[in-house]
Amino acid sequence: MHPAYTLLAIPLFFLAMGIEWLWGYMKKKDVYRLNDSVNNLTVGLGQQVFSLVFKGMLLGVYVWLYNNYSFFHIPATWWSFILCFIIFDFFFYWAHRWGHEMNIFWAAHLVHHQSEEYNLSVALRQSWFHSALAFPIFLPIPMMGFDPAIFGGAAVLQTLLQFPIHTKAVGKLHPWIEYWFNTPSHHRVHHAINPKYLDKNHAGVLMIWDRMFGTFKAEEENEEIYYGITTPLKSWNPAWANLHYFVEIFQKTRAMKAVDKLRMLFAEPGWMPDYLGGQQYAGEPSEANITKYNADTNIYLKIYSVVQYFVMLGAGTLYMMNFKTMDSFYRVVFFLLIMITMLIIGSIYENKKWMIYAEYARLVLVMLALNTFYYFWYINWFNFVIGVSATLFVACVIFFTYSNITSQRQLNSANAQ
Protein backbone atom coordinates (compact mmCIF):
# COMPACT_ATOMS: atom_id res chain seq x y z
CA MET A 1 0.00 0.00 0.00
CA HIS A 2 1.59 3.28 -1.17
CA PRO A 3 2.02 5.60 1.85
CA ALA A 4 0.66 8.54 -0.16
CA TYR A 5 -2.84 7.05 0.20
CA THR A 6 -2.68 7.74 3.93
CA LEU A 7 -2.14 11.41 3.12
CA LEU A 8 -5.68 11.64 1.73
CA ALA A 9 -6.90 11.59 5.34
CA ILE A 10 -4.76 14.60 6.36
CA PRO A 11 -7.57 17.21 6.04
CA LEU A 12 -9.77 15.06 8.27
CA PHE A 13 -6.93 14.67 10.80
CA PHE A 14 -6.49 18.44 11.06
CA LEU A 15 -10.24 19.02 11.23
CA ALA A 16 -10.50 16.55 14.12
CA MET A 17 -7.55 18.18 15.90
CA GLY A 18 -9.18 21.58 15.46
CA ILE A 19 -12.40 20.31 17.03
CA GLU A 20 -10.45 18.77 19.91
CA TRP A 21 -8.56 22.03 20.49
CA LEU A 22 -11.89 23.93 20.51
CA TRP A 23 -13.26 21.45 23.07
CA GLY A 24 -10.24 22.07 25.29
CA TYR A 25 -10.59 25.84 24.89
CA MET A 26 -14.25 25.75 25.88
CA LYS A 27 -13.49 23.47 28.85
CA LYS A 28 -10.50 25.67 29.83
CA LYS A 29 -8.16 22.69 29.51
CA ASP A 30 -4.65 22.79 28.03
CA VAL A 31 -5.01 20.00 25.51
CA TYR A 32 -2.32 21.15 23.05
CA ARG A 33 1.12 22.74 23.34
CA LEU A 34 2.45 24.17 20.10
CA ASN A 35 6.00 22.82 20.35
CA ASP A 36 4.79 19.35 21.37
CA SER A 37 2.13 19.20 18.66
CA VAL A 38 4.42 20.42 15.87
CA ASN A 39 7.01 17.89 16.99
CA ASN A 40 4.42 15.09 16.88
CA LEU A 41 3.37 16.09 13.36
CA THR A 42 6.97 16.44 12.20
CA VAL A 43 7.91 12.97 13.48
CA GLY A 44 4.77 11.59 11.81
CA LEU A 45 5.64 13.11 8.45
CA GLY A 46 9.13 11.63 8.75
CA GLN A 47 7.56 8.21 9.28
CA GLN A 48 5.57 8.59 6.06
CA VAL A 49 8.70 9.57 4.13
CA PHE A 50 10.67 6.61 5.50
CA SER A 51 7.74 4.36 4.58
CA LEU A 52 8.45 5.04 0.90
CA VAL A 53 11.43 2.72 1.26
CA PHE A 54 10.32 0.33 3.98
CA LYS A 55 6.76 -0.35 2.84
CA GLY A 56 7.83 -0.99 -0.73
CA MET A 57 10.33 -3.63 0.41
CA LEU A 58 7.95 -5.16 2.93
CA LEU A 59 5.09 -5.40 0.47
CA GLY A 60 7.50 -7.07 -1.96
CA VAL A 61 8.31 -9.71 0.68
CA TYR A 62 4.58 -10.19 1.32
CA VAL A 63 3.82 -10.71 -2.39
CA TRP A 64 6.75 -13.10 -2.76
CA LEU A 65 5.56 -15.26 0.15
CA TYR A 66 1.97 -15.10 -1.09
CA ASN A 67 2.95 -16.23 -4.60
CA ASN A 68 5.41 -18.95 -3.59
CA TYR A 69 4.64 -20.24 -0.11
CA SER A 70 0.94 -19.75 0.64
CA PHE A 71 -0.98 -22.96 1.33
CA PHE A 72 -3.83 -21.70 -0.87
CA HIS A 73 -5.18 -18.40 -2.21
CA ILE A 74 -8.25 -16.99 -0.47
CA PRO A 75 -10.55 -15.07 -2.86
CA ALA A 76 -10.73 -11.31 -2.32
CA THR A 77 -14.25 -10.84 -0.93
CA TRP A 78 -15.92 -8.90 1.89
CA TRP A 79 -15.76 -11.90 4.21
CA SER A 80 -12.06 -12.51 3.51
CA PHE A 81 -11.41 -8.83 4.29
CA ILE A 82 -13.16 -9.15 7.66
CA LEU A 83 -11.29 -12.36 8.43
CA CYS A 84 -7.97 -10.82 7.42
CA PHE A 85 -8.72 -7.75 9.54
CA ILE A 86 -9.32 -9.90 12.64
CA ILE A 87 -6.15 -11.94 12.03
CA PHE A 88 -4.12 -8.78 11.34
CA ASP A 89 -5.42 -7.27 14.58
CA PHE A 90 -4.34 -10.40 16.46
CA PHE A 91 -0.79 -10.19 15.12
CA PHE A 92 -0.79 -6.44 15.75
CA TYR A 93 -1.51 -7.13 19.41
CA TRP A 94 1.63 -9.26 19.69
CA ALA A 95 3.76 -6.85 17.65
CA HIS A 96 2.57 -4.03 19.88
CA ARG A 97 3.00 -6.00 23.10
CA TRP A 98 6.54 -7.08 22.21
CA GLY A 99 7.16 -3.43 21.32
CA HIS A 100 6.83 -2.78 25.05
CA GLU A 101 8.44 -5.95 26.38
CA MET A 102 11.65 -6.23 24.33
CA ASN A 103 14.34 -3.55 24.11
CA ILE A 104 14.96 -4.00 20.38
CA PHE A 105 11.31 -3.28 19.57
CA TRP A 106 10.81 -0.70 22.33
CA ALA A 107 13.76 1.26 20.94
CA ALA A 108 11.63 2.00 17.89
CA HIS A 109 8.12 1.98 19.33
CA LEU A 110 8.79 4.36 22.25
CA VAL A 111 8.75 7.25 19.77
CA HIS A 112 4.96 7.00 19.77
CA HIS A 113 4.92 7.40 23.57
CA GLN A 114 7.35 10.31 23.98
CA SER A 115 4.78 13.09 23.94
CA GLU A 116 3.94 14.33 27.42
CA GLU A 117 0.49 15.38 26.20
CA TYR A 118 -2.37 13.17 25.06
CA ASN A 119 -4.28 14.40 22.04
CA LEU A 120 -5.00 13.46 18.45
CA SER A 121 -1.62 14.72 17.23
CA VAL A 122 -0.01 11.92 19.28
CA ALA A 123 -1.72 9.37 17.01
CA LEU A 124 0.36 10.70 14.11
CA ARG A 125 3.64 10.51 16.05
CA GLN A 126 4.99 7.21 14.71
CA SER A 127 8.41 5.58 14.65
CA TRP A 128 10.49 5.79 11.50
CA PHE A 129 11.76 2.22 11.95
CA HIS A 130 9.19 0.20 13.91
CA SER A 131 7.23 -1.05 10.88
CA ALA A 132 10.42 -2.55 9.42
CA LEU A 133 11.39 -4.21 12.70
CA ALA A 134 7.91 -5.56 13.48
CA PHE A 135 6.92 -6.70 9.98
CA PRO A 136 8.30 -10.27 10.33
CA ILE A 137 5.64 -10.88 12.99
CA PHE A 138 2.97 -10.53 10.29
CA LEU A 139 4.58 -12.94 7.80
CA PRO A 140 2.25 -15.87 8.58
CA ILE A 141 -0.60 -13.86 6.99
CA PRO A 142 0.60 -14.14 3.34
CA MET A 143 1.22 -17.85 3.89
CA MET A 144 -2.44 -18.17 4.91
CA GLY A 145 -3.33 -17.01 1.40
CA PHE A 146 -4.74 -13.52 1.90
CA ASP A 147 -4.48 -11.35 -1.20
CA PRO A 148 -1.95 -8.49 -0.84
CA ALA A 149 -4.68 -5.93 -1.58
CA ILE A 150 -6.86 -7.38 1.18
CA PHE A 151 -3.91 -7.31 3.59
CA GLY A 152 -3.07 -3.71 2.67
CA GLY A 153 -6.68 -2.61 3.10
CA ALA A 154 -6.94 -4.30 6.49
CA ALA A 155 -3.68 -2.67 7.63
CA VAL A 156 -4.81 0.81 6.53
CA LEU A 157 -8.24 0.47 8.17
CA GLN A 158 -6.73 -0.83 11.39
CA THR A 159 -4.34 2.13 11.46
CA LEU A 160 -7.05 4.72 10.78
CA LEU A 161 -9.33 3.31 13.48
CA GLN A 162 -6.63 3.97 16.06
CA PHE A 163 -6.53 7.69 15.33
CA PRO A 164 -9.68 8.76 17.25
CA ILE A 165 -8.76 6.90 20.45
CA HIS A 166 -5.89 9.31 21.17
CA THR A 167 -7.98 11.87 23.01
CA LYS A 168 -9.03 13.01 26.48
CA ALA A 169 -12.20 14.59 25.09
CA VAL A 170 -14.15 11.30 25.13
CA GLY A 171 -14.98 9.53 28.39
CA LYS A 172 -16.02 5.94 28.80
CA LEU A 173 -18.46 4.63 26.22
CA HIS A 174 -21.25 2.04 26.48
CA PRO A 175 -20.06 -1.02 28.50
CA TRP A 176 -20.57 -3.30 25.49
CA ILE A 177 -18.25 -1.12 23.36
CA GLU A 178 -15.72 -0.85 26.17
CA TYR A 179 -15.66 -4.64 26.53
CA TRP A 180 -15.08 -5.56 22.89
CA PHE A 181 -13.24 -2.60 21.38
CA ASN A 182 -10.30 -0.32 22.06
CA THR A 183 -11.55 3.08 23.20
CA PRO A 184 -10.08 6.42 24.31
CA SER A 185 -10.41 5.26 27.92
CA HIS A 186 -8.48 2.03 27.30
CA HIS A 187 -5.81 3.77 25.25
CA ARG A 188 -5.24 6.50 27.82
CA VAL A 189 -4.24 3.66 30.14
CA HIS A 190 -1.83 2.37 27.50
CA HIS A 191 -0.06 5.73 27.19
CA ALA A 192 0.09 6.37 30.93
CA ILE A 193 3.35 6.17 32.87
CA ASN A 194 1.64 5.51 36.20
CA PRO A 195 3.24 2.21 37.31
CA LYS A 196 -0.04 0.29 37.57
CA TYR A 197 -0.88 1.21 33.97
CA LEU A 198 2.49 0.38 32.39
CA ASP A 199 2.44 -2.21 29.57
CA LYS A 200 -1.33 -2.60 29.51
CA ASN A 201 -3.97 -2.48 26.77
CA HIS A 202 -1.90 -3.29 23.68
CA ALA A 203 -4.91 -3.89 21.43
CA GLY A 204 -5.26 -2.18 18.10
CA VAL A 205 -9.02 -2.40 17.58
CA LEU A 206 -10.33 -5.51 19.37
CA MET A 207 -9.90 -5.34 23.14
CA ILE A 208 -10.57 -9.06 23.45
CA TRP A 209 -6.86 -9.87 22.93
CA ASP A 210 -5.82 -8.03 26.11
CA ARG A 211 -8.59 -9.72 28.05
CA MET A 212 -7.53 -13.13 26.74
CA PHE A 213 -3.80 -12.73 27.39
CA GLY A 214 -3.87 -10.92 30.72
CA THR A 215 -2.76 -7.42 29.76
CA PHE A 216 -6.07 -5.59 30.24
CA LYS A 217 -6.42 -2.73 32.73
CA ALA A 218 -9.46 -0.47 33.04
CA GLU A 219 -9.05 3.26 33.53
CA GLU A 220 -9.83 4.22 37.11
CA GLU A 221 -12.06 7.20 37.84
CA ASN A 222 -10.83 10.49 39.33
CA GLU A 223 -7.14 9.69 39.05
CA GLU A 224 -4.49 11.88 37.45
CA ILE A 225 -2.84 10.19 34.50
CA TYR A 226 0.65 11.22 33.40
CA TYR A 227 1.85 10.66 29.84
CA GLY A 228 5.17 10.22 28.08
CA ILE A 229 7.98 7.79 28.82
CA THR A 230 9.44 7.09 32.26
CA THR A 231 12.74 8.75 31.30
CA PRO A 232 11.63 11.89 29.41
CA LEU A 233 13.21 12.62 26.04
CA LYS A 234 13.65 16.37 26.72
CA SER A 235 14.25 17.19 23.08
CA TRP A 236 12.32 18.39 20.04
CA ASN A 237 14.84 16.80 17.66
CA PRO A 238 12.87 14.24 15.56
CA ALA A 239 15.98 12.27 14.55
CA TRP A 240 17.17 11.98 18.15
CA ALA A 241 13.65 10.91 19.15
CA ASN A 242 13.99 7.93 16.81
CA LEU A 243 17.58 7.05 17.66
CA HIS A 244 18.19 7.87 21.32
CA TYR A 245 17.14 4.54 22.82
CA PHE A 246 19.26 2.60 20.32
CA VAL A 247 22.21 4.75 21.44
CA GLU A 248 21.30 4.13 25.09
CA ILE A 249 21.24 0.36 24.54
CA PHE A 250 24.67 0.50 22.92
CA GLN A 251 26.10 2.59 25.75
CA LYS A 252 24.75 0.21 28.39
CA THR A 253 26.06 -2.91 26.64
CA ARG A 254 29.63 -1.56 26.62
CA ALA A 255 29.96 -2.52 30.30
CA MET A 256 28.30 -5.94 29.88
CA LYS A 257 29.65 -9.42 29.35
CA ALA A 258 29.32 -10.80 25.83
CA VAL A 259 26.34 -13.03 26.56
CA ASP A 260 24.49 -10.14 28.25
CA LYS A 261 25.03 -7.87 25.27
CA LEU A 262 22.79 -10.17 23.20
CA ARG A 263 20.35 -10.68 26.04
CA MET A 264 19.97 -6.91 26.36
CA LEU A 265 18.34 -6.72 22.93
CA PHE A 266 15.50 -9.04 23.90
CA ALA A 267 15.22 -8.19 27.60
CA GLU A 268 12.44 -5.97 28.90
CA PRO A 269 13.12 -2.23 29.18
CA GLY A 270 14.89 -1.41 32.43
CA TRP A 271 16.69 -4.76 32.57
CA MET A 272 20.33 -4.80 33.63
CA PRO A 273 22.45 -7.77 34.77
CA ASP A 274 22.82 -8.19 38.53
CA TYR A 275 26.45 -7.07 38.49
CA LEU A 276 25.29 -3.70 37.04
CA GLY A 277 22.45 -3.16 39.48
CA GLY A 278 19.70 -5.45 38.21
CA GLN A 279 16.22 -4.53 36.97
CA GLN A 280 15.32 -0.84 37.18
CA TYR A 281 11.74 0.20 37.91
CA ALA A 282 9.94 3.48 37.30
CA GLY A 283 8.79 5.52 40.28
CA GLU A 284 5.30 6.91 40.84
CA PRO A 285 4.83 10.17 38.90
CA SER A 286 3.29 13.21 40.54
CA GLU A 287 3.02 16.98 40.09
CA ALA A 288 6.09 17.31 42.31
CA ASN A 289 8.41 15.21 40.15
CA ILE A 290 6.92 15.74 36.68
CA THR A 291 8.00 18.84 34.76
CA LYS A 292 7.05 18.90 31.11
CA TYR A 293 9.86 19.75 28.73
CA ASN A 294 9.49 23.26 27.39
CA ALA A 295 11.43 26.31 26.23
CA ASP A 296 10.45 29.96 25.90
CA THR A 297 10.51 30.56 22.15
CA ASN A 298 9.84 33.92 20.48
CA ILE A 299 6.29 34.18 19.09
CA TYR A 300 7.55 35.14 15.62
CA LEU A 301 9.83 32.11 15.50
CA LYS A 302 6.86 29.97 16.51
CA ILE A 303 4.86 31.40 13.61
CA TYR A 304 7.79 30.83 11.28
CA SER A 305 8.14 27.21 12.41
CA VAL A 306 4.44 26.51 11.83
CA VAL A 307 4.60 28.04 8.34
CA GLN A 308 7.68 25.98 7.52
CA TYR A 309 5.96 22.83 8.80
CA PHE A 310 2.99 23.31 6.46
CA VAL A 311 5.31 24.11 3.55
CA MET A 312 7.22 20.91 4.38
CA LEU A 313 3.94 18.99 4.62
CA GLY A 314 2.89 20.16 1.16
CA ALA A 315 6.32 19.45 -0.29
CA GLY A 316 6.44 16.07 1.43
CA THR A 317 3.03 15.17 0.04
CA LEU A 318 4.14 15.99 -3.51
CA TYR A 319 7.39 14.12 -2.92
CA MET A 320 5.56 10.96 -1.83
CA MET A 321 3.02 11.13 -4.63
CA ASN A 322 5.73 11.49 -7.29
CA PHE A 323 8.40 9.33 -5.69
CA LYS A 324 8.21 6.49 -8.24
CA THR A 325 8.60 8.78 -11.25
CA MET A 326 11.31 10.99 -9.74
CA ASP A 327 14.99 10.80 -10.71
CA SER A 328 17.05 8.92 -8.08
CA PHE A 329 19.34 11.91 -7.50
CA TYR A 330 16.43 14.17 -6.61
CA ARG A 331 14.81 11.47 -4.51
CA VAL A 332 17.86 11.65 -2.27
CA VAL A 333 18.17 15.45 -2.43
CA PHE A 334 14.55 16.14 -1.48
CA PHE A 335 14.62 13.43 1.19
CA LEU A 336 17.64 15.12 2.81
CA LEU A 337 15.99 18.56 2.58
CA ILE A 338 12.87 17.24 4.30
CA MET A 339 14.99 15.73 7.06
CA ILE A 340 17.01 18.96 7.47
CA THR A 341 13.80 20.98 7.66
CA MET A 342 12.53 18.72 10.44
CA LEU A 343 15.76 19.15 12.41
CA ILE A 344 15.67 22.93 12.07
CA ILE A 345 12.03 23.17 13.15
CA GLY A 346 12.93 21.17 16.25
CA SER A 347 15.96 23.36 16.90
CA ILE A 348 13.79 26.50 16.81
CA TYR A 349 11.87 25.23 19.84
CA GLU A 350 15.15 24.43 21.60
CA ASN A 351 16.60 27.90 20.85
CA LYS A 352 19.72 26.39 19.29
CA LYS A 353 22.24 29.04 18.18
CA TRP A 354 23.35 27.06 15.11
CA MET A 355 19.76 27.07 13.87
CA ILE A 356 20.11 30.61 12.47
CA TYR A 357 22.98 29.75 10.10
CA ALA A 358 21.48 26.36 9.23
CA GLU A 359 18.16 27.90 8.21
CA TYR A 360 19.72 30.44 5.85
CA ALA A 361 21.74 27.63 4.27
CA ARG A 362 18.63 25.46 4.01
CA LEU A 363 16.66 28.18 2.23
CA VAL A 364 19.46 28.54 -0.35
CA LEU A 365 19.63 24.75 -0.84
CA VAL A 366 15.87 24.55 -1.31
CA MET A 367 16.05 27.24 -4.02
CA LEU A 368 18.87 25.44 -5.82
CA ALA A 369 17.29 21.97 -5.61
CA LEU A 370 13.78 23.04 -6.56
CA ASN A 371 14.73 25.17 -9.53
CA THR A 372 17.36 22.84 -10.98
CA PHE A 373 14.79 20.04 -10.68
CA TYR A 374 12.24 22.00 -12.71
CA TYR A 375 14.87 23.22 -15.16
CA PHE A 376 15.99 19.69 -16.05
CA TRP A 377 12.68 17.84 -15.77
CA TYR A 378 9.79 20.30 -16.14
CA ILE A 379 11.24 23.18 -18.18
CA ASN A 380 7.78 24.50 -19.12
CA TRP A 381 7.16 25.27 -15.44
CA PHE A 382 10.61 26.67 -14.74
CA ASN A 383 9.86 30.40 -15.11
CA PHE A 384 6.75 30.12 -12.95
CA VAL A 385 8.50 28.10 -10.24
CA ILE A 386 11.57 30.34 -10.08
CA GLY A 387 9.36 33.40 -9.76
CA VAL A 388 7.23 31.96 -6.97
CA SER A 389 10.14 30.34 -5.12
CA ALA A 390 12.25 33.52 -5.30
CA THR A 391 9.38 35.56 -3.83
CA LEU A 392 8.90 33.05 -1.02
CA PHE A 393 12.66 32.89 -0.46
CA VAL A 394 12.90 36.66 0.07
CA ALA A 395 9.81 36.64 2.32
CA CYS A 396 11.23 33.82 4.45
CA VAL A 397 14.64 35.49 4.78
CA ILE A 398 13.07 38.81 5.83
CA PHE A 399 10.63 37.29 8.33
CA PHE A 400 13.18 34.86 9.76
CA THR A 401 15.73 37.66 10.19
CA TYR A 402 13.16 39.88 11.90
CA SER A 403 12.12 37.00 14.18
CA ASN A 404 15.70 36.42 15.29
CA ILE A 405 16.37 40.11 15.89
CA THR A 406 13.21 40.34 18.00
CA SER A 407 14.15 37.17 19.88
CA GLN A 408 17.62 38.52 20.64
CA ARG A 409 16.19 41.83 21.88
CA GLN A 410 13.84 39.98 24.22
CA LEU A 411 16.72 37.85 25.51
CA ASN A 412 18.90 40.92 26.11
CA SER A 413 16.04 42.65 27.90
CA ALA A 414 15.46 39.61 30.13
CA ASN A 415 19.18 39.38 30.96
CA ALA A 416 19.30 43.09 31.80
CA GLN A 417 16.53 42.65 34.34
Image (spheres, grey):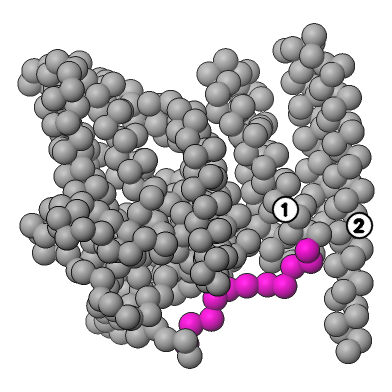
Q: Which residue is mark 1?
A: 305
Quarter of the image where the C terminus is located: bottom right
Label 2 crowd (10 A; few <14 / some 14-19 / many >=20): some
The residue range painted magenta reads 289-299
The amino acid on which the numbered mark 1 sits, given as a three-letter code, is: Ser
Mark 2 to mark 1 CA distance (whole Å): 14 Å
Residue drawn 63% across the image and 44% down it: 339
Q: Is residue 163 left or right of residue 146?
A: right
Is 87 colored magenta in this rendering? no
The amino acid on which the numbered mark 2 sits, given as a three-letter code, is: Tyr
Which image quadrant for residue 198? bottom left
Residue drawn 38% across the image and 80% down it: 224
Q: Where does the image place residue 333, in percent across and percent down from the top left?
A: 67, 31
Residue drawn 37% across the image and 41% down it: 160
Q: Is residue 350 left or right of residue 149?
A: right
Q: Nearer the viewer, residue 331 or 208?
A: 208
Q: Is residue 125 visible?
A: no
* N-term mark: 2 or 1: 1
Kind of element beneath mark 2? helix
Does 111 sit above or below residue 30?
above
Q: Is residue 42 visible?
A: yes
Q: Which residue is mark 2?
A: 402
Label 1 crowd (10 A; few <14 / some 14-19 / many >=20): many
Magenta-drawn stretch, dominant element (helix, strand or loop): loop
